[in-house]
Image: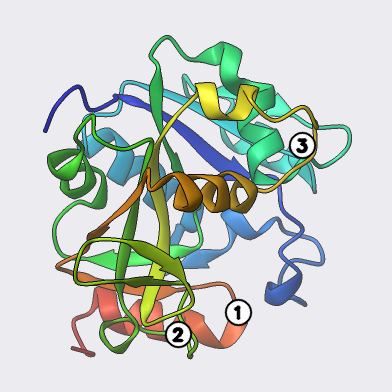
Amino acid sequence: MRNAPDELMLFAAGFGTRMQPLTDETPKPLIEVAGQTLLDRTLDLALEGGIKKIAVNTHYLGSAIEKHLKDSSVDIFHEQNILDTGGGLKNASSAFNGSTVFTSNSDAIWSGENPFLFLAKHWEDDCDALLLCAQISNIHGREKPGDFDLSENGTINRAGNLVYLGIQIIRLSLVDEVSESVFSLNLIWDTLIERNRLKVATYSGQWCDVGRPENIVFGEQLLERKIV
């Protein structure tokens, strides 16, 4: 681990379309799994993982998230127009002091080593972004295909059996290279693949995507250790 960040951009602005009808009146980060919101579960992991500064972006039903976080120390960046992941990070970049940050989604359940600590252990200055991934055969609530492929020589390519688990470490300067205000982090990842500056760390624990209503039960079973 070298110069791993202790700051986090937590994405909470999405519409939660895959989670309908549960998200008709509740933003996805406030959906509960085993009695605790997805947002709070992610925040707890981040704080346990040594994160000292957190920024959260909001858009859809943002007032509910802001109310939920009113007693916390997080910085909230409400987007009048949704900016996607890259634009959201760029818009909130003023909140951070370091040159690198964690970014995280909140729609997952974890079992195993704290994912922030795990990724921090694998961060080195020889890349511009480090993605936390896992083999698709080792995760729950997600079907093929995966997102990336890791060749024997360490080269990252699109499509394969590796699934991005929603947490990364990334250099903030990358979002400033993009002139648009609305863009996905996928745009940056594709550039880094061309530069051979994208790396992955393969998670050793278990992970469940809770992006759909039917996956909530998988998340609860993972927490109860009923699935392995």
Q: Secondary structure at mark 2?
A: loop
**What separation in Å lies between label 2 and label 3 (alpha carbons)?**
29 Å
Q: Which residue is disc 1 drawn over?
A: 212
Question: Can you tell which of label 3 and label 1 is closer to the viewer?
Answer: 1
Q: Earlier in the sequence, mark 2 or mark 3?
A: 3
Q: Residue 189's spot in the image, x, y percent? A: 52, 50
**In the rendered image of this protein, does residue 156 appear above or below residue 61?**
below
Residue where numbered disc 3 is placed:
63
Residue type highlighted by circle 2: Gly
Q: Look at mark 2 in the image and give the residue it sits on.
A: 141
Mark 3 / mark 1, whichever is N-terminal: 3
Along the horizontal axis of the image, is 171 left or right of 155?
Answer: right
Per the model, the C-alpha gap separating discs 3 and 1 is 23 Å
Residue 168 screen position, x and y as percent: 38, 46
Are the residues at dot 2 and dot 1 in contact (C-beta closer than 8 Å)?
Answer: yes
Q: Are circles 3 and 1 on residues that touch, CB within 8 Å?
A: no
**Residue 59 % position (x, y):** 78, 41
